[in-house]
Image (spheres, rainbow, N blue to C red):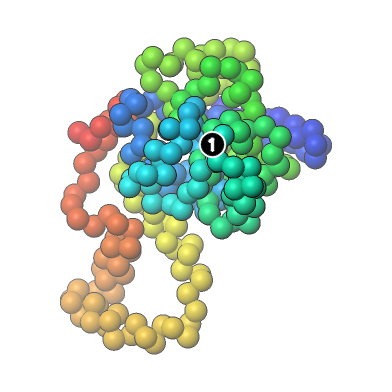
Amino acid sequence: MIDLAVDLKNKTARTVAHLAISCPFQNRLSALADVLVCYGKQGKTIVFTQTKADANSLILSDKIKQDIEVMHGDIAQNQREVTMKRFKEGKFKVLVATDVASRGLDIPNVDLVIQLEPPKETETYIHRSGRTARAGASGTCITFYTNKTKYLVEDIERLAGVKLTRVGIPQPEDVIKASANAILTNLVAVHDDVLPLFTDTAQTLIKDCGGDAEKALCKTLAFISGHYKAALAARSLLTGQER
């Protein structure tokens, strides 16, 4: 559902897309990694966790490829301020936080909010989702839930008056296409002056591909994206497990 709300501070309309993903607890880290690729794109993302331990586990996960930093109650106030400054300046794209970051903080240009599980209090959901779509911008709020926490999503819909659209975990094809688009966006930063340094390698690659430049480029993009080793296995829309 698209929620049209009003940013009272800036007196502008804002648009939030409320989505919900059913995902077993044991699959949520791999699912989160793919959601960050497909929905996060190049903007800022805040991932909310219920506990400090959950927040720390994301930092240690090898599944998440983006630069992330964490903020919770065990981190000193001065370090939190440094982290927030770096996040606002775009030094990293994904902030993992407990509710210490959900209230009273003005963070511009947050495109995506992810909740690893639905909060028990509807007011908490409202505050968390309100971190995106500031100052007239649009944004997305995605909430993970399980069979055991499905009732919390229904409570939020009933009490907050919003409908969370159920969507599936991204399929491998979606992740690869999103990765390729991200690479394409970053290629604008490549300066023409460095291109001659890669001419010999590019010509060798094209020769190895039978003179097919498109095939050579596709192989390069596949390698850079990290998706190049095997055929893709379909993923269950209900559980996220590979079939």
Give the percent coordinates (x, y) of residue 40: 49, 46
Residue 81 falls left or right of residue 95:
right
Q: Position of residue 122 (x, y in %)?
A: 60, 18
Q: Quadrant of residue 198?
A: bottom left
* Front-lying residue, 79 or 167: 79
Q: Up-down: is 154 above or below 97?
A: above
Q: What residue is pinned by disc 1?
A: 74
Q: Toward the viewer: 218 or 131?
A: 131
144 sits to left or right of 226? right
Inspect the image, locate mark 1, and give the three-letter code of the amino acid beneath it: Asp
Residue at (80%, 40%) from the top-left corner? 10
Residue 106 position in % (x across, y down): 71, 42
Q: Which quadrant holds the C terminus?
A: top left
Q: Residue at x 48, y 82 (%)?
A: 192
Looking at the image, how many numbered discs can be counted on the residues? 1
Residue at figure coordinates x 45%, y 57% from the top left: 182
Report if residue 167 is visible in the image: no
